[in-house]
Structure formats: C-alpha cells, structure tokens
Amino acid sequence: MGTITRKMVELAQQKGAEMSEAYGLDARELSIDVSQGVVETMKLAEDRGVGLRIFKKGRMGYAYTSDLDEKVLESTVERAIANAVWTGEDPYHVLPSKVEAYPHVDTFDPEISKTAVEEKINLAKEIEAAARATDERVKITERSNYQDAEYTVSIVNSRGIDASYRGAYCGAYAYLVAEENGENQTGFALSYGLRFSDIDPTKVGQEAANKAVRMLGAKRIASKRMPVLLDPYVVTQFMGILTPALTAEAVQKGKSPLAGKKDQIVASDILTLVDDGRLEGRIASAPFDGEGVPSSRTVLIEDGILKNYLHNSYTARKEGAISTGNGTRGSFRGTPEVGTTNFYLQAGQETQEGLMAGIDYGFYVTEVMGMHTANPISGDFSIGASGLLIEKGRLTTPVRGVAIAGNLMELLQNIDGIGNDLTFFVGKGAPTVRITSLPVSGD
C-alpha cells in the first residue's frame, strides 16, 4: 500500500496540486455469530483502497477508489484535482509536515491471525455455554459473537510524511434473554482488546447472564429526586454526548457548550477526562492519526477545569494551536474529522460498594434508552432508564420504566464520587460514577 500512496502523491504533484496526501487502508474483518451452540453466521470481509486529498489555490479536492488498477489510480488523482474547482477557498487548509519519529505503540498481536477459525468459533460457543450454566433462566441467546480485524494503514503527503503501521484487534460479546413467569429481561457483556489471550469467554458469558437475571421482577417506582449511581457503560454513553463539545471544530462553529470556557471550572473537582492515543493495550491506539500527526495524551478536563480541546491540523491552524493528533479517519472513503481515540474518565479511589454505602435510598442506573435524543449543544437530556434500587447502601429491587432528566453540564458538576473500576467499552472508558441527585420520573 505504501508504494501506491507514494505514487498517487507524486502524480498529484505532477498534475498541478500544491499539496497532496494519500491515505491507504488494507483491512480484513472476521465476525462469527453463535446461537444454541450452532454457528448462525460467519462473515469475512475485506476492504482495501486509497483516498486522496489535494490542495490548490486554497481549495481542497478529494477522491477515493477501491480499484487499485494503475489507470484507475490516475483517474482518481484527476478527479480529486477537478473536484477542487468546486470548493471554496479556505486559508486554514494545511497538511502536517514531516515527522522525525513516531511514538512506539504496540498495535499488533500475531496470535489473532494465527489462531484457527475453529478455535474462534469455540470461543463464541464457550460464551453461550457459560451464560446458560450461570442460571437456568437464561433461555435465549440473541447473539454470542466473536470478532477480529487486521489492517495496515499507510499515509504519504507532499510535505515529507511517509508512514505506515500494522494493527489488529479482537473481541467478543453476548446478548442474552432471561425468562421467568412470562417475563423477559436482556443482559449483555463485551470484551475487546489487542490480544486474543485476553478474552475470557466464561467471564463474558457469566456477566451477560447475571445482568439479565438480576432484572427479572423489575418494577416501576414513584417519582422522586434521589442520589444516582451510573454504571460504567452508562457513563460512556453520556461521554458520547460530551465528545463533540470537546472538539475544537464544534467550538469554532459555536456548537459547543464549552466554548470560551478554557481554564474555567466546568465539572466536579474530582473529575479528570483524558484522550490518549498511545494508551497501552487499547484498540484505538496508534503511532499517528489519520493525517500522520503523532498520537498524544491530551488532558481535556483536569480536576474539574477545562484544559484543552481536541484538534486536527485544520482546527489547530485556525486557532493558532498545535494538533493534538485527533484527526480521526474511519476509512479511506472520507477526509479527517476531529474525534477521540481512547477517551476515558480517570478512575477514583472508591469501590462501588463504597459509593453506595452512604445512600439510604437511591438508584443504580445500568441501562439507558434514547440517548441519541440528548442535545449535544445545550446538553439537555431526558432518557429512559432501568437499573436497581439502592436501599441503606445495598442493591435491592430491579427497576424499569422510569426516566432521568437533566443537563449534562450540570450533571458533570454534581458528580460527588468516582469508582476505581475503570472499564473500557471499545474506545471509551469509565468507572462507576455517583451523582449527588437527579430527578427520577416513575409513577
């Protein structure tokens, strides 16, 4: 792929581009679904192609192709140059310059590709078997899944960047249904990482089963304002709403509630939010971002104070800043956006039991519904929720059919406890979090 990206940049420069960049991706993905001990689906997909950005007279042109025939590559270059005619001039268009050295980031486990498909199928079967062995009320396996991917990224630009790396990741998840007295409840669990040996199928199956079973007999509760604990997975869903607000792109467009608040208190003084593209063992880690800028660790909120925004090369130039290495790219089919890598809320010191200990009556939220309806600009949310009652410091009755509402920025300031159980769900990680109080709407 490196040869192809170099050739496209050379060709683009010959045809009149002032700056050019080629991004190549060669990826393979495997997905296996098991139900009732039988493989339901097994998919092996390959994705290979290259995208080209060119700049001429302050205008950007872009084109991509998955056909790597030499004539098609040349026509892709010509299309990118032709497309630049139709875009507006922008003085902030820029490509990063040559980098002398990138950080060492371990991104590839050869065991993933060496492991036989039969062993991967057995892993998915073990998850389902472990779930059913955990409790006889686990009746339905919606999905017991194993996934892995192997890929090579190559990026070359006319300012001297010529870099590539090889990556791989794997993971598994279970989505189950428990039944009792005509009632159904679901439970899920997942585990993703860089090493095949780190997947524990028994743990995944048992966790999914326990989550489903513990919600059997769930009831509604009366509306009341009360202390609330958020499960790590729920916290990462709130973080997904917060992510755009922390990008310089949203700030510059006036679409972030955090605009103009740098070095100000925006959250509880026990909260620290970090984005770390070099974090060991995480699947979003890489030596460089989608533009060839070295990955970095960026503290966004430290002890409740807003310290930084996330930048790619464009937003950094516009603000007179330095790119944080957050020019993210999902594939060769699109241009770099500003996004997170390994985005996480730093763990605290308390156990989950310790967070509950002082709560006489509260709500532990394990699942939320309708998070997509939250407003990322204002931060307002009103979402469905389910979980477990906390009574006298202990989890008791399962609860469903209620709603929680508020404002994300206020929620951040009302965090008064953070657990030590930092858990990653693919690219986002969080521990259990305690909120001083939230209105819970029920009967």
Image: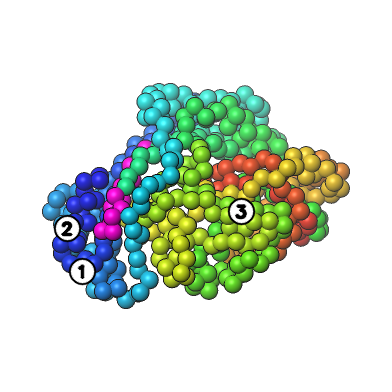
- SS at badge 1: helix
Q: In the rendered image, which residue does mark 1 sit on?
A: 82
Tell me: 231 left or right of 116.
right
Q: Name the disc covering residue 11, or none.
A: 2
Q: Identify which residue is drawn at 52% across, 29% down.
A: 198
Q: Earlier in the sequence, mark 2 or mark 3?
A: 2
Structural crowding at the residue carrying mark 1, measured as other residues with C-alpha within 10 Å and reported as few (<14), some (14–19) or many (≥20):
some
Q: Is label 3 in contact with label 1 (beta carbons under 8 Å)?
A: no
Whole-Å distance between the Cαs marked 2 and 3? 43 Å
Mark 2 residue element: helix
Q: What is the distance, in whole Å, between disc 3 and disc 1 at their CAs?
A: 42 Å
Q: Magenta segment: does it hold 40?
A: no
- Say which amino acid is labelled 2: Leu
Instruction: Tell me the element at label 3.
Output: strand
* Rendering coords of residue 63 (x, y %): 26, 60
**What colour scheme governs how the chains and residues are painted in the rendered image of this protein?**
rainbow
- Examine the rendered structure and indicate whether residue 376 appears above or below residue 45: below
- Magenta residues, start to end: 150-162
Name the residue tied to disc 3: 273
Q: Give coordinates of residue 379: x percent, y percent.
A: 62, 66
Q: Residues within 10 Å of mark 2 (few under 14, many from 20)?
A: some
Is disc 3 surrounded by few (<14), some (14 to 19) or many (20+) residues within 10 Å? Answer: many
Q: Is residue 369 visible?
A: no
| Amino acid type of the residue that numbered disc 3 sits on in the rendered structure | Leu
